[in-house]
Amino acid sequence: MAILKPSNISPTSAQDASKSITFSWQNLGDRQYYYQIQIYNNSTSELAYDSTKIASLNAFYILPESILINGTTYKYQITVWNQLEEFVSSVWMVFKCSSAPIVNFTNLNLGSEILNSSYLFQGVYSQAEDIPIRSWNMILYDINDYIIGTTGVQYSDVIEYEFSGLNNEANYQVELQVRSQDDLIATTGKIPFYCRYEVPASTITLQAENVAEKAATRLSWRVTQIIGNVLQGEISYIDGEKIDLTSGIISFQEGLPNFRDFSLKLWIDWVDLKNDIVIYPADTFLGVIDISVRESVTEILRLKSSIGDIWVEWEYENESDGRFHIYKNFYGIIYHLYTPIMNPISGNNVFLGIDFNGKLVNVNSTILM
């Protein structure tokens, strides 16, 4: 036989120079008795490392950590000798040294406690040579390391995802994996957290009915969740079914679903809302003159989340007519819709319906009586 050039040589992909790098090859000709690896700066052709001639049958070599420099592209060549001291060199191979990326959660620490059934996990990516991110993946585990949710591979530089449906008083783990444009991977590892939130109180109305023809008893029941608290002022109840909010504000912080997708229906017993004309003095080139301004906006409802708010306002446009305005402000981008003009009077029952599918908001209203 004859001595042949080494083949199937690696590495060819990016390597982190702060860690050891394994060079490997395959011999298809005479048995190798010696080898030598020489590494050069690909831009300057300056010798960066020389293993010297090593007596070994091994077809791999481990370069110690921190010999090469991250952010630099190298070329290398492997030379092998047979027992007759005949030698041959491989083709030149090229690879880049690049630092592994760094990834962390920005709003989660080891052993954090989450006080909701859903949570928007957010992460941050960095890399020493400013190599951009290629992709990321977030994985949710239970306490036994079983995967219960994943984002799949995301090709975006915005790292955030909301996992919902978290159980009360349960332990979870979440992991964030990132990949740089140089194809190097980093992970946060599995970060444990505990989920705990208040479950709304409830009342159960149980009714028993005798069914004589079947010699049985029919049981029926209705469960009512008790949620919300007084945020400001005072409230009262009308007929045990309606809340009088003319002197107070209520807040619901639990028991509500994730409002990335919802339909909300409100029936409002109308009362006269703020509709004042205020006079303000204004400096003009003709001197100080009085300007009349209508102050007639009342906020009806606000839904808050970690990514922004959705809220509803009523605004009078004259002495009696007005309309509902609905606003969505997610990530600082404001979306606005409004209903047709209507003129409810005190004592009317007004219906307001809101549909939201994560991107589009629809709103409609009518006076029922």
Image (tube, helix red, strand yellow):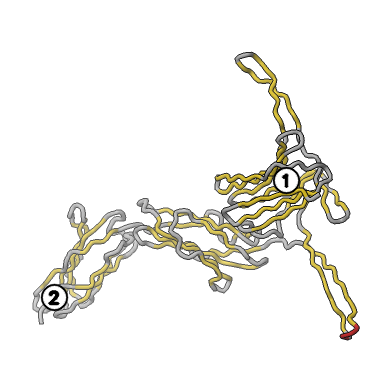
The secondary element bearing badge 2 is classed as loop
Residue depicted at x 18% and y 65%: 77
Q: As drawn, is 183 to the left or to the right of 7?
A: right
For this rendering, which residue is in front, 266 or 105?
266
Q: Which residue is mark 1?
A: 300
Residue 21 picture location, percent across and down: 30, 65
Question: Badge 2: how crowded within 10 Å, few (<14), some, or many (20+)?
Answer: many
For this rendering, which residue is in front, 85 or 6?
6
Q: As drawn, is 191 to the left or to the right of 114?
A: left
Residue 42 picture location, percent across and down: 21, 56
Q: Which residue is mark 2?
A: 4
- Quarter location, residue 18: bottom left
Vertical side of 123 occupied by 64: above or below = below
Q: As drawn, is 54 to the left or to the right of 140?
A: left
The secondary element bearing badge 1 is classed as strand
For this rendering, which residue is in front, 189 or 311?
311
Looking at the image, do the residues carrying marks 2 and 1 touch, with CB atoms under 8 Å apart?
no
As measured in the structure, the alpha-carbon distance from the residue carrying label 2 to the one carrying label 1 is 82 Å
